[in-house]
Image (cartoon, helix red, strand yellow):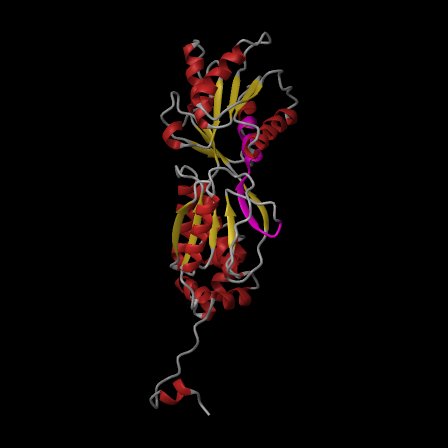
Amino acid sequence: MADGPERSRPMGQAVRPARSTIRDVARLAGVSVGTASKALNNNGALREETRERVISAARELGFRPNDLAHSLHRGQSLTVGLISTDSFGRFTIPIMEGLEECLSDSRIGVFMCNATDDMEREARHVEQLLGKRVDGIVVTARRADQRPKLAVATPGVPVLYVFSQTDDPETCCLVPDDEGGARLAVEHLIGLGRRRIAHITGPERFQAVCLRRDGYRAALGRAGLPEPEGFYLPGVWSEGWGREAVAELLRSRKGPPDAIFCGNDQIARGAIDALRERGLLVPDAVAVVGFDNWEIMAEATRPPLTSVDMNLRTLGREAGLTLLDMMAGNEVRGLRRLPCSLVVRDSCGAKSTGAAAAKTLDDSP
């Protein structure tokens, strides 16, 4: 006997076929749901043959990319929460922009909450987000150091850490490749003929500082260059420290550096000011590279600052794809480091093309 809806259908009316889902497309193409999503939304690094196979499967099934939300979220809220400790938004805003850009194709909205390193406030935000029946939670911060695992009482709600991480191997964490970004910067300086390269950076209690230091030393080692004594100077994240560190470098009896790799753009700006005050032209006498590519600062520096970009917006888009995969029920875990790029401006001494140019580790100096 037919069920209720079938009995109530007028005679002669065609039965509407069931809507195909993203899982159907993934199954037919022989890929994961996350890979299918990347192919249909033209995101992520996929082989062209994989992308074409997914698109062909979608056509065969009559599946449209806009059906992604329906296929993954029937009966759910079409919202996710983002909890951050970055009260200035310097790192969180580009991550959120990339996240929203990815999730908007699935008609998923993002609720943003600021916890400001207050664990009680964070717990209230989690409770409120769960009360709104969010389909997932993204945890981010103003630095990528380890933090306690988020306490989520509701089972089945995926939690993803972006520009943040825990020591729990069962969690999924996406962070920039700080060490690779530092290697990229120093290798670029070496390729420009610089040989006495100093590194001014922030406090060593931060993991990023240690990773960038390791990248600096690795690049020198690969080129067969020594690290001159006193050329590695950890301190604080400020322009003032950049000025102080330059004064210390120039007091060295072993001679000044011909390049300085700085742990962030604020330090680099202070270093450039100090070099100018002492009559040392940048980049003629000393080349300078920063880290973060904080455009409002890098472009206003004189000369404009070459800087490592952590590609936070791309990190946010990858977070969206990963979260969709987790929300579809796939098991995703482990730490992933996404590549940085180098935005080349005038401060390093590379030939200017009139506009900033991006380099990756695969590019030649």
Q: Which residues are magenta?
A: 169-187
Q: Can residue 283 be seen by looking at this rendering?
A: no
Residue at 55% across / 32% down in the picture? Answer: 206
Residue 161 place in picture, x, y as percent: 52, 47
The answer to whether residue 307 is above or below residue 283 is below
Q: Residue furthest left?
A: 10
Left or right of 63 on screen, residue 233: right
Residue 13 place in picture, x, y as percent: 35, 86
The answer to whether residue 295 is above or below residue 127 is above
Name the foreground residue: 102 vs 263: 263
Left or right of 12 on screen, residue 48: right
Q: Residue furthest bottom?
A: 1
Report if residue 177 lies within the magenta region: yes
Q: Classify residue 257 by image quadrant.
A: top right
Left or right of 225 on screen, residue 39: left
Q: Can residue 259 be seen by looking at this rendering?
A: yes
The answer to whether residue 288 is above or below residue 47 is above
Residue 135 place in picture, x, y as percent: 45, 59
